[in-house]
Amino acid sequence: MIIEEMTMTGFEAGLALSRTVLIPFGSVEEHGPHLPLSTDTLEAYEVCKKTSQRIELFVAPPIHYGNCRSTACHPGTISISTATLKALFTDIVTSLRSHGLRNFVALTGHAGGAHRMALQDAGEELIARFDDIQVAVLTEYDLAKDEGQGLIETAGDAHAGEIETSRILHSHPHLVTGSAPREFPSFPPGILVRDKRRYWPGGVWGDPGKATAEKGAKLEELVVTRLVALVKELEGMDHAGH
């Protein structure tokens, strides 16, 4: 049940089928010279929609903006503060809860550390505030990396490399512009730098050259299967005991 495509009455009827909602979080962030700025959002939303074809649940419209630090100096990146991100997640869950939803899964396609922690902090505050809800915060990239260990050839592949390029080649091939050189940036340990692009000129962390649409299709399938299992686990939890 894709919320942005539903009517008021359709949404109301859907509550009889499910009280679970997937909330895809993404970013507007550089992904090298070959992938679209919305890569993280596209990946998360695609997986959520595919999951809704497997089990009955709601999919919220994606949140296109995230907190981006290491890519903040790269052209096209539009970052929001962690406070804004926390407030968005909190307000969305609070509003959907008022309509009767009870299980909330934030699936973030953006894997930035501060971004993930902001969502987790908001989730912890929400379950402390409401004792009738369940919240999960999942990083889409981590699911792809963990579930696709046998497929991925590039050790340490992390951003706009083999994994993400394969994913977009599969789901949105018309948005991929060629490839990009292999790159593994190195930031000075412990030192906060202003000009992050100086240490990461190409905006790639991994090897896009090893990407294929076939790998992308397999990775997406693995992530969807894992997400279905996680949703079922969340729905089966005893509210009083967690």
Image (cartoon, rainbow, N blue to C red):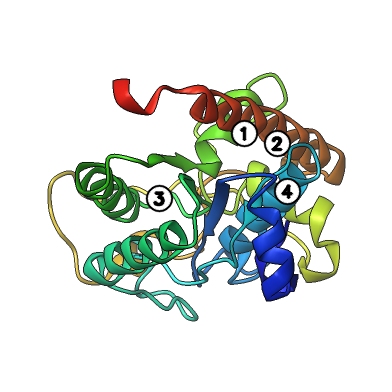
Dot 2, crowdedness within 10 Å: few (<14), some or many (≥20)? many
Residue beneath label 2, please?
224
Nearer the viewer's eye, disc 4 or disc 2?
Answer: 2
Q: Which residue is mark 3?
A: 185
Residue that badge 1 annotates? 227
* Disc 1 residue type (three-letter): Leu
Q: Nearer the viewer, residue 196 or 54?
A: 54
The residues bearing labels 4 and 3 have C-alpha atoms spaced at a distance of: 22 Å
* CA gap, disc 2 and disc 1: 5 Å
Q: Spatial distance from mark 3 to mark 1, Cα to Cα?
A: 31 Å
Label 3 neighbourhood size at 10 Å, few (<14), some (14-19), many (20+)?
A: some
| Residue under the image location 12 percent in, 53 percent down | 191
Residue designated by label 4 = 167
Quadrant of res 2: bottom right
Instruction: Give the left or right position of residue 155, taking residue 181 as reference.
Output: left
Amino acid at dot 3: Pro
Instruction: Identify whether 50 is placed above or below 9.
Output: above
Please report contact status of discs 1 and 4: CB closer than 8 Å, yes or no.
Answer: no
Nearer the observer, disc 4 or disc 3?
4
Query: What amino acid is found at the position of numbered circle 4 in the picture?
Result: Arg
- Residue at point 66% right, 43% down? 162
Query: Is residue 39 left or right of 78 when viewed as pictured?
Result: right
Q: Secondary structure at mark 2?
A: helix
Among numbered discs 3 and 2, the one appearing first in the sequence: 3
